[in-house]
Every structure is written in C-alpha cells, then in structure tokens.
Amino acid sequence: MAKVADRYLVVDTWKVVEDGFDPGRNRVSESIFSLGNEYMGVRAYPEEGYSGDSLIGSYFNGLFEEIKVAAHYKGIIRFLRFMVSAVDWLYVRINVNGEALDLATSPFSDFRRELDFKRGKYVRSFVWHLADGKQLRLTFERFVSMNVSNLGCQRISFEPLNFSGQVDVRTGLDFSVVHEDQGRCFWQSVRHGWEEGVTAMLGETTGTKNRLYSGFAMDVPNAVQTKPVEAERFIGQDVTIRLTQGEASTFDKFVFNCAEKELSVTNDRLWSAGLQQAKAYVGASYEELEQSQANYWENVWKESDIVIEGDPDNQQGIRFCIFNLYQTYHGDNPGFNIGAKGLTGEAYRGLAFWDTESYCLPFYIFNNSRAAKSLLEFRYKSLPHALARAKELDCAGAFYPIATIDGTESCDLWQHSNLQLHVGTAVAYGIRHYASMTDDLDFLYDKGLEMLIQISRFYATRGQWGQKTGLYGYFGVMGPDEFQLMVNNNCYLNLMAKKLFEYTLEVIDRMSGEAEEAFQALAERLDLTAEEQVDWRSKAEKMKIPQDPETGIYEEHDGFFDMPHLDIHSIPVTEFPLYSHWSYDRLYRYDMIKQPDVLMFMFLYSGDYTIAEKIANYEYYESRCIHESSLSPSIHSILAAEIGKEAEAYSFFEFATRLDLDNYNRNTREGLHTTSIAAAWMNIVYGFGGMRSDGGRLSFRPTLPARWDGYSFPVSYKESKLLVEVDKQRVSIKVVSGNPVDIAIYGRSCSIDSTGMTFELEQLVGQ
Amino acid sequence: MAKVADRYLVVDTWKVVEDGFDPGRNRVSESIFSLGNEYMGVRAYPEEGYSGDSLIGSYFNGLFEEIKVAAHYKGIIRFLRFMVSAVDWLYVRINVNGEALDLATSPFSDFRRELDFKRGKYVRSFVWHLADGKQLRLTFERFVSMNVSNLGCQRISFEPLNFSGQVDVRTGLDFSVVHEDQGRCFWQSVRHGWEEGVTAMLGETTGTKNRLYSGFAMDVPNAVQTKPVEAERFIGQDVTIRLTQGEASTFDKFVFNCAEKELSVTNDRLWSAGLQQAKAYVGASYEELEQSQANYWENVWKESDIVIEGDPDNQQGIRFCIFNLYQTYHGDNPGFNIGAKGLTGEAYRGLAFWDTESYCLPFYIFNNSRAAKSLLEFRYKSLPHALARAKELDCAGAFYPIATIDGTESCDLWQHSNLQLHVGTAVAYGIRHYASMTDDLDFLYDKGLEMLIQISRFYATRGQWGQKTGLYGYFGVMGPDEFQLMVNNNCYLNLMAKKLFEYTLEVIDRMSGEAEEAFQALAERLDLTAEEQVDWRSKAEKMKIPQDPETGIYEEHDGFFDMPHLDIHSIPVTEFPLYSHWSYDRLYRYDMIKQPDVLMFMFLYSGDYTIAEKIANYEYYESRCIHESSLSPSIHSILAAEIGKEAEAYSFFEFATRLDLDNYNRNTREGLHTTSIAAAWMNIVYGFGGMRSDGGRLSFRPTLPARWDGYSFPVSYKESKLLVEVDKQRVSIKVVSGNPVDIAIYGRSCSIDSTGMTFELEQLVGQ
C-alpha cells in the first residue's frame, strides 16, 4: 500500500519547473501548472492548439450546469450540478507561411515551463523548428490577476533565431469548449461583437442560463494587419506580426471575464458593464500588470510562508500548497467555496465537501481570517437550501449537502448524499473554531448561532433512541469512514452531534447574556423554544459513545468489533484502489477502514482525550486503515507525532506536500488534490508544530523531524500574528504584529509579545 | 394500513365480467382481462384503436431489450434488460362511411366484456351509434391458444341493427408499438410481404437483435374487396365487408407468432419456417380452434380446480388466480420463467425474482410437476450466468440474480442486486422441495446437485467469520425484509444458508451411494473436494442464528432489537406506500419490517419449530410488519391459521384471491400481481388446508374459515393425485389417481387410497 513518488519535475524552492516535454505527462503538468485567483482558474493546456492528450479546462467559481437524474425514490436528488467547463480565453493559433504550430506534430527543442510562486505566473518556452529550417523561439506567459479577479493576461513572444518574416496569429474567445466528463459543450452565444477596441462574446449555459461575458483587448506592437474573425461560439481577431531575426515581437492579450448567475440582470446590462470594464485594458501595459501581480504575491509570502531548513523537496512542496490555497481561495468573493480539486479540473465536478470546514478552514483561520469568515458565509448564504434539504429528508432544521456547488445537494450516489450527515457537524465545528480563535462575536451572534440552531434541529430530528440501550444516536448513517456504508451509532457522528448540541446551548447562553436584545430577536425569528433546548441537552447527555472499558478503544459503530478481520497488508498492491478492483459491496464487510473516523474526533477534540487513549485507539485503527482518501495520512501523522511515533509521523507526512508534484496517486492529471494540500499545512503546523486549537487557548508542542534542520511558520491568533521558529535545540515564539497573546508551550502558560520567548526543544512521550 | 377493495366487477364464479365501460378504469381492466399462454401474453387493450388511456401491451416470454446503465463501481450491472413491448398482432381499424370507431369519442351502448375461465377467451361487445343514426353491434373475441403456443386468434362480428351496408376494416401487424416505460419503439422491420395467403413481417429489436416473425391468415366470408397495405413497421390488409341488417358478418384472423433469440438462425430460415406454419391457418375454422381451446381448459379445471362453498367472491377469486397461473406458465417451453407481473404489463420489466421458487413453485409442484421441473431447468440453463455473476462479485460458485429475464442480473438498484443473496437459497429450497415431493432423483442427480454445489460454493465464499463471536454468517446483506438495507447476519439468510449446506452434503452423500459412477463423474467435472465439504459442514455448524433464549424470538439481524421502535399503527394512512412518501433512507431505521423474514423461515422449515416459538415470533414480528409487499399477507395468514388465530388468518387472506379483481393496491393498471396470485393458492392449501411439505412426508391440519361452508382442493404427490375435501364437520381425503400414499392428518400417520379416509374437523391450538 506504500505510495510511491513519480519524481519528474525539477526541485526549486520557489518554482515548479519542467525541463523538456513528455506528452504522456502533459495532463499531469496541466494540473500542476494551473493558475487561479479564486474567481477563475485555468489549466496549463497549450493554448495554441494541441492534437495530443490535453484537457482544455477554464473554470469560473460557482458557474455550473445541471443534468436531470432519474431518481428512484423520495429524497434522492433530481439534478446533478457541476462546475462547467467554460470559455477558452487564451485561445490562439499560430502559423508561419501556412505551417501550423502543434506540439504533438511540430518538431521543437528547448522546451521548459515554470510556475513562479513569487510572481504568480506560468511561463512556457521552446524553439519551433519549421519545415524549411527556420527556427522560432516562442515564449508563452500567462497569469490570472490576484488584484482584479476578472482579469486574465497572456503574453506570447516570438523570437526568430535564423530568419525574418511574419507570423499569422488567430486569437479569440472560444465558447465551444467541450465539457469532457459529459461529452458536450454547454454554451451558446447570446451576443458578440467588436466595439471600442474590445472583442467580446456573451455566452450562456444551455440548462442553467449562467452567463459569462468575455472581452479582450490586444497590444501587438509589430502588427502588420488585424482582421476580425468569427465562427460558431467563437469570436476573435486574425493578426499578422512582423518578425525580425534576433528580436522578440510580443503579442499581449488582456481578457476581462465576468460571470453572472443572477437571471434578473439583463443581457444588455451585462454586455455594457463588461465592455465598460474591458475597454479599460485597451492600451494597458503587460509589464505593469505583471509587476502588480508580483507585489500581491510578495505580500502573501510575507504573511504565510513556511520555511523548512535542510529539506528542499518539502520546502518546494509546502510552498506549492500555500500557493495553491491562495490561488483557490482567499475570501475576496463571498459566496464561493473550495471544490475538492479547486479550479484545476473536472474531477469531483467542482463540488465542495466537508473538506472545506474540516481541512481547509484551519489554514484560513490562522492565515487569513477574512477568508475563513467568508467560507462560513457560504454556508450561511446557502442555509435556505439546507433547510429545504432537511425537509426533503423528513427532518427539521438544516441539512448541509455532502457535495455542492450552489448550496444544493449534488452527490448522485444516494448512499452518500442521504446517509452522510457529517457536513453539518463540520460546519458547526468550523463556526466554533473560527469564533474561538478570532473572538469574532459579531459573526457568531449575527449568523453563526442561527446556523447552529438550525443544524441542531436537524440532528435532534434525524437521530433516534435505541430500544435496548435507551441511548440517543444516529441509525442508518455513513460516517467519514466510507468503507462502512450504512451503520448505526457511528461514534464520530454521535460525538460530533453531542458537541454540537453542547456548543449551541453554550452560545445561546452566552449571547442571551451578552447581547440580550439581539438574541431575543433571533429566538423569535427562529421560534426557538425552551423545550427544544431541554431536548438538545438531554440528547447530548444520553448520546451513545461506545468505548470498551478495558482497552479504552472506541467502537467505530455498533457491531464494528465483530466485523470480520482482514490483515490489510495481505491485500496485493495491484488491488488498490479497492474501489476499482473490488466488487462494490465487498468493501463494506471488514473491519478495514478507509480513513480516520475515531482518530478524527480524537484530533478535533484533542484536549478531551488522554495520551493513553490516543495511543490505544491509534494502534487499533491505524492498523486497519488503508488511507483510500488523500485526506487520511495527515491526520494520522499529526496523531503519530503527538504520541511520540516520530518516524511514523514523518512517513505519513512524506507525500503530504508533494502529493501532486510527484503524482503519488497517479491521478493528478484530473486536477490537483486541493483540499489535501490544506491537510499538508495542518500536518506541519498541528503535527510537527504540535499546535492545538480546540481548547479556549492556542497551544504548541513542537517537535523537529530528524531530517530537518529547522522550520518556521506564522499563525494569526486573536488579531495578533505569531511566528514560531524551531531549530535543533530551541523553539522561539514571538508576536510579529498585534498585541501580546496568552498561549501554552509544552503545557506551560505564557504570554508572548514582540520580543518573544525561547524554549528548549522537548522530546515527546515515547512509544 | 387496512387495504380496501375497489369493488367494481360482476361476481361470477366462472368468469370475470365488466358490465358497462369506465374509461378511468380501462387500464385496470386491460390487466385483468389479459390473455396469455406462457409463450405470449396480450393485455385487453381495445385493438380497434382507442385515443383514451390505454397500454397496448403484447409480450413474448423472454424477448428482451437492453439499455446501458452508467455503472459507478465494479460489480454493479452494466446492462438493464427488460421484456420488450412487441407487435400489436390484433391491430384493426374500423370505419363505416368514413366514420372511425374509437370508444373514447364514438357514442356506444350495451358495453360488456367477459373473461371466460372455462373457454380461455376474452369477449367484448357493444353497440356503436353512428352519426347518421345507424347502429352496429360489434363483438370482439380473442384467445391465445394453449394447444399451439404460437397461435393467437381474433374474431370480430359485425351485426347492423338498423341498416345494411358496408364496413371498412384495416387489419394488420403493427411493430411500431412504443415501449411506454422507455418512451420509444425498439423494433425495426427486417422483411415483410404477402405470400400464399399469409401477410407477414419479420421484426427485430434494435439493441439485442431478438427477432419475431408474425404472419396472419384471414377468413372473411362477406368480404367485398381486399387490398394489401403497408406503412413503416406495419403490414396489413384493407378489407371491405358487406353487412346485412340483423345478420352477423364475421372477420376471423389467425396469427402465427414465432420469437427467436438465437442469432445463428438466418432471417431466411426464420421467414420460411414462419410462413410454412402460418399458412396452415389459411382456411382454418375459428369455431374448431376455439373448441379445442375450451377442451384444454376443461382439463385444467379437472386437474387443479379449488372449490369453495358459500363464498362466491373467493370462488371467483381463486379461479382467477389458477387461470392466470396456467396462462402465465405451464412448462411447455423450457427456458421460460415467471415475471412478477407475468405477461400483463411493463411493470417490474417482465423480470423474475425469488418469487418464482418461493411463491410460485409450490403451485406447480402440487398441480403440474412437469412445469415445476421446467422452472428449475431455467436456473440450470442460466447457471453459466450465475457463475459469471459470482465471479464479478469476487466470489466462487453461482450467484443467482435478484431480477432477471435471461439469467443475467437486471436489477439496477445495486443495493438490491449486490446485497440480496436470497435467490440462491430459494433455488436450493426449490430443488429440495421438488425432489422430495416428486421423488424425481433423475433431475436431482442430473442437474439439481450441480446447482446445489455451485450455490454452496457461493455461500461459502460470500460469508465471513465474526471476529468477536467466532460464528459464521453474512455481512453486508439485505434480507427479504427490504426495510433493512444493509445488515450483518440476517437471520433468514443465515438459516437458509445453513440448510443449503446441510442439504447439499445430504444429496452428495445419497448420490455417491445410490449412483456412484454418475457422482464420480460430476465430482470430477466440478472439482468437488473433500476439503470444501468439510468447510461447508463447519460453516453450517457454526452459522450464527441469534435467538433470545428468554423469549424464543429470533433477532432478524445483528442489532435489530436495539433499532428504534415505531408503532406502525401510528403512521397515517396517507403515507402509504412508504416508498413514495418517506425519504428513502428513513425507511431503514426502525424496527418496522416490510414483509416476513423470520416468519418466512418458520414457514419454510415449519417442522423445525414449536408452536410456542411460532406464537412468540408471530406476535413480535407481525406487529412490526407493514406488508409493503403483496407477497406478505399470505405467509402471515398461513402462520396465523397454524397458531389458531382464525380471524386474523382470514383477515390476511381477505384480499389474497381478489388482489387484482378488486384492485386493492390501486396499481393493477400496471399489470397483474402474478406471483402474489400464487401466494393466494398457498394461502388456501397451506393456510386453511394446513398442508406442510417441508418434512419427508406430506401432512395436513385442515381448518374451515367461519364464512365458508366447505372447500376442496387437489394435490399431486409422488405420482399420485389426492383430493382434500373439507366441510363443517369433516375432512375427507382420497387418492383420485395413482397409488396409495402415506401422509399425516392432524399428526396421525395414515395411508390414503382411492376409497379415501374421513376425519373429524379439528379445532387448532387456540390463543
């Protein structure tokens, strides 16, 4: 089951570099070299047209299509919604004397591409060998602006090495892109035209009527001739550029994209607003825009860089992760969420899962709390959908979807969408986590509590009382461990629901004291009754949390201890992933688990459990876990670090930062494991840094992996910013901005200010 | 939850009669008045064209189409196969002076239709009132021949009441029939023509290339003119018939249909074979054919009639059941099975379930043992498919499909097709039941044991050992009670598998003694090892069959006793059927059951359980059962009769024989509940007749329902035929053909011969 790196790319701590072109790996590179700015994302496909294996992927956060699904029964979804593949705004075709460039067929040399973390851009260059011996160096640059989220920029430089002449360039906006998974294009053109230096098209999806205005301006100093061109679902310009031997002629394209899901906005308004903004880029300077992009990223690294000494691989890896977390989400646009693959591919359909609150949210809480809040706002905005979904499932309150793009449920496997209830508790945990780390009571009282109350109502109606035990719990559920399809009293879920009830009651108690008037208004609006609070209290108290009194091991669900045992190491490597090689039902009948479940709650509520309990449960469940979720190893690594299994902790960490760079799961071609990237950050900060944030106060128990010389990471906490630095002897912590804060280091309370404190590095409990 | 009769039809003990026409009930009547002869079936749709609500349904046993389904995971089916709607061979259009007949728009009077159990034909008549005051009496007769299974006959009589003139008739074969569930026609014409008095078309299904030759001859004494006519997927004749006031002019059509699934048969061969046989009906006599049909049915009633004195409703009902059991299946054509709706509609897609062995087989064992054997031959023929399916599910041996038309799995709900394992044990039970009641050792040794061995192999690889209990059982299954989606150790399944292993070993033991050479050949062919027999023995011995030692109640599956309780009588009537009104997952989290599960095995292995155990389990499970399967009430009735709950037994029986006649489930419009019809027979013979056939010897404990004056039923047993007659005082049993047999009455052994024996009617154990 060991994962094996597919080492290929050059190691560079501030860049991803591919030296030479391997067509067999092109799709993998397209994912890795993807660009995004939260508003839009674009795979690193060869924009000049490529007849080899490639996925043209250009995505806009939240833009979706839907298809009707045959629903057999009540409560099973009727529409499958997915992030739709959108306009290829980088479209270009290049001809010299009628000879077309296509890397699948044209001879070329000196291929190299780079993704630059410091400047936030993607550069690709090579020398094209034409049939008549001419050699033309082409350099393609692109970036999507972090400053103006609608803006995408492209520069192509042509440098003839041994001739002078002309190159014919067709550039444009191509709405005829096929959504590969569905095998068809979902776009139609509503309007197009050339006005005021802008070439534009307004496209519309056929089913959902989502619209996208795309308009571009060009800057081509050596243009000889320019001519408008159009085709079905395509608009553009044909440009002929003069080339002089040894000199670079540039072609710059500034594309303004504006997505609109609101049906009430007229096409005219969309068109004129788009034009208004797009034309601002007529005469723009590529250099200036590119420099301001670099400035943005300079700030990001100032805020969030993790430095690892003595391990360039992981240094590159963690920067790749942080780079992509910012690319995918930074909270500029409320209403967005984080798809499992970000904006880098069609896999998982662009849908967001519980990964958002369970794996991504911590990164944002401790790096960019505005973004963290914005993520929770997504859940608040989609509360009406969650209320409707609960009703569909014959329950009260709010049931958050297991997979969503717009707040509605979009998982077409009913066994997951109807039986997996853990998104709601993850949202509640996220609210609690965010509020306790930021002290943002405004959010908590204004929106957080409303969600908590509605989520609690769901859990109070979905659960039932065991007839023999008299205890409360959830029957007919699937926990995070998806290898147990439908069980009763999943321990993780029961525990999380218990905590949910307790926290909701705690916030009610606190708000009714601290903000009485606002609370009364809320209680009235939601018809909050004393009876339901009594009910939640009683359900929390009588929640079934089964633990073997002798061993201290929690039983993952009713009957788990009697499930047939399988030595997971006896499964031949060729049978992984099991989903593809085992009959579907066979997955469900062993004591083998897919990902942490009991261990997950022992991490989330770390302070509630003793080291002895953690050791006992880790030993039991780790040996049964096959990690068929890319989110799994990091949680194991964090717990292993805590219980002193240093080598194991490092071995689980080993592929965390480079999961995609080294294509460990051999499916990076489909897109990046964006939410797993967030787990890599957790792995370093919670794992080696030993940070815990589940109590009222932040605490640290840093360790240093044997292979590292040192590392440092920043943490935002209650409006201050801390820097934690670890080397072979010492741990130093200081406040780099904001007021002094009280935290705990190795269990000792201390107040940290800007001068900081230094501690000796401690050995943790051994095995 | 009480079922309510929708009384509408006239009660007549030898017919079904509808007096007057109710367009809102037309589809229901189309199902009820269906005709079939096992080879083909046809709904009672108005063949003259009807623009109202109607389902043109003409079906051929085993003819199927398939559509590809998107399979998410391994082991989930890739093709959905279904009985395809086929040629409308009764097609006719009737015009008088350009005025077309259509009961949805034409005025008419004196409508009446009858289904005649004695003659096996369907007759419909009415008077058509033409716009100009003319009145034409039309009588439509049809039957599908029980003697020549390819033959369907139609007679239309025209009797002008107040005029003389002409009628224009277009008759033909219409292959353009739309399969309603799929919304399209699956047929294309391969060849058509008029030769030697036969008008014919050879049709082919587009996907599966199943073929159907259909050719007809006509006899129209008063024909004035005849002209061939054709259209897309249609061929026919236009006939003008002279009408004389007060006289009936007849139009007779003899249709020869021949279905072919074998691809190697050429179209030429099919065509000429069809023509050869169809032309034999040129010049045929309708009266003669109709009389020989009546003769066939006379024999059926001699063989199988159940007489009920003092209850014309149930008398009509049980004859309707027996009539339909013979119509659906009588074993003339090996390779056929019995769809849940027989040949009467598209619902359940024409697929056969475990109903065949569990509910239908007993009727055939005791009425027509050749048909019983033929049903088991279907499973033998499809053994290769079952072997392949087991492999797909990572198991050894044979896994019989939960729903099938051709032996492959065709249930597209993976939760049923992958988790329901009980067809295999039902087949094994059927083999045992058939062999023990008929002493047909040839079948048992020639085919039965091979199936038993392969089925045992499946159950020995699909099951697992409980880690805590050390007992064997099945994890991740759905029992017959489909309200428990995925459970461990379903008690019914575990018990049936234990019995399967034991019986397989018993037959191995017996055959190796009685037919050593044949056994050695079989063992060699199947690689039967001593080790696997030891393994089966050990699994049978260590099978988990959980029973509460205090109450004697069997636990339906692990954890059932802790499942949340629901008082089923508290569910509002409007919420039934729950499948339509409750969120799908909600069905699965109560101690409510859909149909008997524990009670089912207490019936199947009745002799193994004491009356006290039956009472305890009946009280417990009956109060939790909502009978959302039409198969459920009869089993409850049989057990209620046995434990002395006479009133309850009758109340569960009440809708058994008239389920469709009185449209209890309000869905008879989709087709008849053909397999439930078989349960009605079981209800009388096993329930009131108290027959038990699970031991080595047949036994009876007859009771008489309070509302009846008496009843009698025949039973074939070991090549003899018994007649059981019950009146208010006595039970008489005699052999009506064959040798004397040893049976038990009220627990007393006796040898019955043709003079018979008479016993006093006994009261059974009271409550």
Image: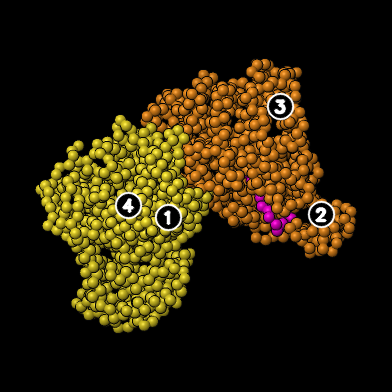
Chain colours: A yellow, B orange
Magenta range:
B48-61
Q: Decide: few, some or many residues near mark 2? Use Cα within 10 Å; few <14, some 14-19, many ≥20.
A: some
Name the residue carrying label 3: B704
Q: Relative to residue B710, is residue A457 drawn left or right?
A: left
Q: Name the image quarter holding residue B686.
A: top right
Q: Earlier in the sequence, mark 3 or mark 2?
A: 2
User: Where's residue A653, x and y in %?
Assistant: 23, 48
Name the residue carrying label 2: B109
Q: Relative to residue B641, is residue A275 drawn left or right?
A: left
Residue at mark 4: chain: A
Image quarter where the C terminus of chain A lies is top left
Q: Decide: few, some or many residues near mark 3? Use Cα within 10 Å; few <14, some 14-19, many ≥20.
A: many
User: Where's residue B400, x and y in %?
Assistant: 51, 37
Marks 1/3: CA–CA distance: 65 Å
Residue at mark 3: chain: B
Name the residue carrying label 4: A432
Q: Is residue B52 magenta?
A: yes
The amino acid type found where label 1 is placed reads Ala
Residue at mark 1: chain: A
Q: Name the image quarter holding residue B487.
A: top left
Marks 2 and 1 close (CB-CB < 8 Å): no
* Magenta-drawn stretch, dominant element (helix, strand or loop): loop
